[in-house]
Image: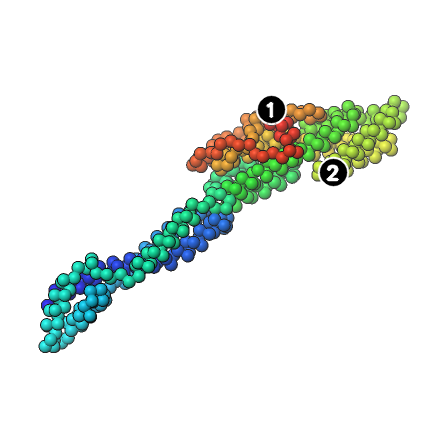
Amino acid sequence: MAKPLLNSLRLIRRRLLLVRALEAGLLGAIAAAPVAAAATALRILRPESVPLAAGHPALPLALVACGFALGFLMRLVMGVSLRQAAVAADHAAGLKERLATALEVLGREPPGALDERLAGQAAQAAAALDPSRLRLARTAGRSLKVLLAAVLVLVAAALVSPAGGPPVARQTAERAAEALGRWAAEKPEAVSPEVRDQIARTIQTLTEAGLRRSTADEATRQTIATAVRVARSRRTTLDEFQKIGSPEVEAMARAAAAADGAGAASAAEKAASRLVPQAGSPAAPEADRRRVADGLSGAAGVARGEQFPKLAEQLDAAADALRRADAEAARRALIDLAARMTQDLSEPPGAGVQGLVAVVGEARRAMGLEELPAATATGSGAGVREYPAASAAGSGLPANLGQSAGSLAEGQGTVAPAAGAEVKPEDRDVVRRYFGG
């Protein structure tokens, strides 16, 4: 009778092992759920602290699946003994430990008088059992409910976009930063320090680990906003020279704005010769000289307010020399002023807002961000400064920018439709001059 009983118990043991493994898997998944919830919270609330590879919304669900698999496999390895199978079957079928007792007496030497009869009854009872119908599970029902609730919460959380939007591929961001840095490096003297500092900050942002689209969007927009602000400051300061009403000073401003240092110096020489000539030459009326000096002082105040302190100092020096009617001092001061104006107010084609927008626009398209206003329109402003046309093809940009931007965009999906960035009212005049709209 031993063999039939053992065969029946082996079938029950196989079923019990599967049930216990499933229960252990459920417990493992439940244990992994808090870790998955923490990963989800980090992905949503602190995405910058999560590596790009770990930022996928399905990762928490994968952690739960891994917890289930780990618990399931560990329980399979542990196995189930025949005695455990007998005890579980007795409990499930209400056999009052008949199978467990019979299994114990099988090992007695010599067997007792009632052992064979007990084993025979147990074998009959075990043979009548269907392992698939035995209620062998202990915790599966409760564990399954808890796990389903946790999975539903994680699935709902997976649909929540992280703060800062989806991540940007690191290689794409690094290539965008490289293109921006290359553009600035090719114009070391033409890009203003403020814009150069902002470009450096943007490059640092684009190369940070775990970069999000909102962060990249803000950094690139800030770069353009800084360039527009500097251009507006230049424009405001240049317009102030027109108010002076001196043809020579206006010529200085035009030459300086076009980065024509020699032309600005020549205009300064003419201004000095007319306003404070050397002995023996006819001098301009006193009122004319004082008007120009007052105009330069007014321009100094504007330059100081527009964050051109060195230009303001030079304007004050020139105004003082004119008031003193010191011919040599006025000549030196006006020539120095022309050099400072060329350094602070010049903006050669391709080094200003248009050229920068072209580069930043390529980078933004590669990262899947909405486009900024195109930098291909010709614009000119009334007054002392003519703004030359600049485009991505003719603005002094790197020749391989188009190809590199194309490679940047590979694998990034559909680019968002073009949409103009919001423009502050005080910047509209500058944008109109640069973008023709």
**What is the x, y in percent for residue 82?**
20, 66
- Whether residues under marks 2 and 1 lie with C-beta atoms below 8 angstroms apart, the answer is no
Can residue 180 be seen by looking at this rendering? yes
At horizontal 87% and vertical 31% (from top left) the residue drawn is 325
The total of numbered circles placed on residues is: 2
Q: Residues within 10 Å of mark 2 (few under 14, many from 20)?
A: some
> In this rendering, is residue 187 above or below 19?
above
Residue at mark 2 to residue at mark 1: CA–CA distance = 30 Å
- The type of residue carrying mark 2 is Arg
Rendering quarter of residue 94: bottom left
Residue designated by label 2: 304
Residue designated by label 1: 378
Along the line of sight, the residue nearer the viewer: 179 or 22: 22
At horizontal 48% and vertical 34% (from top left) the residue drawn is 416
Looking at the image, tell me whether mark 2 or mark 1 is earlier in sequence order.
Answer: 2
- The type of residue carrying mark 1 is Thr
> In this rendering, is residue 240 above or below 45?
above
Q: Is residue 227 left or right of residue 170?
A: right
SS assignment at label 2: helix
Can residue 311 be seen by looking at this rendering? no
